[in-house]
């Protein structure tokens, strides 16, 4: 009992420290890279929203952005690791485990020498990995790299395509943090132009995934420091925290009703970068949650998949706000056509489309 209590206290401490770091914007993956300028976007009048009945993602990409995008085939994702995994092991670390999830991904856990497969964070983290990759398979999401190297006890949390560095207890087995960093494999400083989209695509998609997989996970406090609410929707709950009066982040959430994307400042060009960074983060969070809660999870997931698919054909071009706009409208027309006008009015306003 005593040991369990100590773990609990330790877990809570780790979460608090992580939370402080996250809220300061220090930890989060793409955050290794300089945030890009948030720009307003204009939709060309020639944009046609042709509908593809088959639902094939490549044809969706061609319908949204034109056949030019896919003509050269997929590009190599530069950050994927192709060398000898053993070369990544440093003094005091070992390869704890190497296993396959789905057909393509070789997941390698690099851990300190004293960590074993029976350590609670490894037990919990492996279950979370199994579930997220099974979600990917069910939803035809292909991880960008053949290798995914996870440094399980790195004292921060960072993620990019093929690499994930994450703290142990309260990191590797903390579902929203692990999935956030994993989703930075898709949305990071290389692939996405604006800060709000880079960070929040990698936050809101994980919330959707958690709602889809949480019933499959054998939750217990020994292996998991954080257990999501199993009864209500995680996406809905997060949205309420920002938008309903009296809830925890209501005051911060007001930035979304007060501002559109073109009113947000660039953290690089201001005196108070932390505050502005946080403002971009919160704005993006509420925007993506608003679209998900009010217009459907399917259109959000389809959009995020299509955005990364487009990027994978031409990695020299970052995903722009305009790409998000075009793709979301395309999928709303396909999945929820009666809402099309309402969504367009909202997105025109929030993304400053003239
Ligand atoms: Zn992040």
Image (cartoon, rainbow, N blue to C red):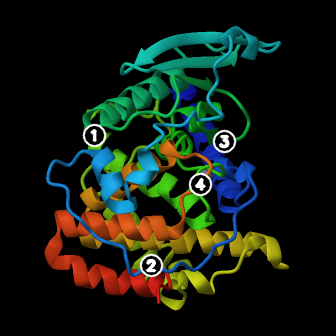
In this figure, which residue is indicated by the disc labeled 3?
A: 157
Q: Residue at x 33, y 87 (%)?
A: 345
Q: Which mark is residue 238?
A: none
Q: Is mark 1 within 8 Å of ligand 1?
A: no
The numbered dot on residue 43 is 2
Q: Viewed as shown, does residue 64 lie left or right of 83?
A: left
Query: Could you tell me which residue is drawn at 30 percent across and 58 percent down?
Result: 63
In the displayed structure, 201 sits above or below 163; it is: below
Q: Going from the N terminus, do you reach mark 3 or mark 4 first?
A: 3
The residues tagged by marks 3 and 1 sit, at their Cα atoms, a distance apart of 26 Å
5 vs 64, nearest the viewer: 64
Q: Quadrant of residue 340?
A: bottom left
C-alpha distance separating marks 3 and 2:
36 Å
Q: Is residue 75 left or right of residue 166?
A: left
Labels 3 & 1 near each other (Cβ < 8 A): no
- Return the disc, 3 or 2, that comes first in the chain's sequence: 2
| Whether the residue under disc 3 has CB within 8 Å of ligand 1 | no
Measured along the vertical axis of the image, is residue 77 above or below residue 239?
above
C-alpha distance separating marks 4 and 1: 25 Å
Structural distance between the alpha carbons of marks 3 and 4 = 26 Å
- The percent position of residue 288, horizontal first and vertical second, equals 42, 67
Q: Secondary structure at mark 3?
A: loop
- Residue 317 tag number: 4
Estimate the x, y position of residue 348 in percent, counting from the top left.
Answer: 41, 84
Q: Residues within 10 Å of mark 3 (few under 14, many from 20)?
A: many
Residue occupied by mark 1: 139
């Amino acid at each position: 009992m005593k040991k369990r209590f100590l773990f609990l206290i330790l877990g809570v401490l780790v979460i608090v420290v992580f939370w402080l770091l996250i809220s300061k914007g220090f930890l989060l993956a793409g955050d290794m890279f300089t945030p890009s300028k948030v720009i307003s976007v204009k939709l060309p009048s020639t944009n046609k929203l042709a509908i593809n009945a088959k639902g094939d993602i490549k044809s969706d990409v061609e319908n949204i952005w034109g056949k030019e995008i896919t003509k050269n085939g997929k590009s190599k994702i530069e950050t994927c690791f192709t060398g000898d995994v053993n070369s990544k092991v440093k003094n005091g670390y070992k390869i704890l485990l190497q296993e396959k999830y789905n057909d393509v991904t070789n997941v390698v856990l690099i851990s300190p020498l004293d960590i074993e497969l029976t350590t609670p964070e490894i037990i919990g983290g492996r279950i979370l990995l199994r579930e997220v990759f099974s979600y990917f398979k069910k939803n035809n999401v292909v991880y960008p790299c053949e290798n995914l190297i996870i440094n399980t006890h790195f004292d921060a949390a960072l993620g990019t395509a093929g690499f994930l560095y994450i703290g142990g207890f309260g990191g590797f087995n903390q579902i929203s943090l692990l999935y956030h960093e994993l989703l930075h494999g898709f949305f990071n400083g290389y692939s996405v132009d604006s800060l709000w989209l880079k960070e929040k695509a990698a936050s809101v998609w994980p919330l959707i995934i958690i709602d889809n997989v949480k019933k499959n996970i054998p939750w217990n406090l020994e292996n998991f420091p954080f257990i999501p609410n199993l009864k209500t929707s995680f996406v809905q709950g997060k949205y309420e925290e920002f938008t309903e009066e009296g809830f925890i982040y209501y005051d911060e959430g007001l930035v979304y009703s007060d501002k559109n994307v073109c009113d947000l400042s660039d953290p690089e060009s201001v005196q108070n970068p932390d505050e502005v960074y946080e403002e971009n983060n919160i704005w993006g969070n509420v925007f993506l949650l608003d679209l998900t809660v009010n217009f459907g999870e399917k259109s959000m997931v389809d959009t995020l998949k299509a955005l990364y698919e487009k990027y994978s054909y031409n990695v020299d071009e970052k995903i722009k706000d305009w790409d998000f706009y075009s793709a979301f409208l395309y999928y709303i027309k396909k999945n929820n056509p009666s809402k099309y006008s309402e969504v367009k009015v909202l997105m025109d306003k929030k993304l400053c489309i003239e």
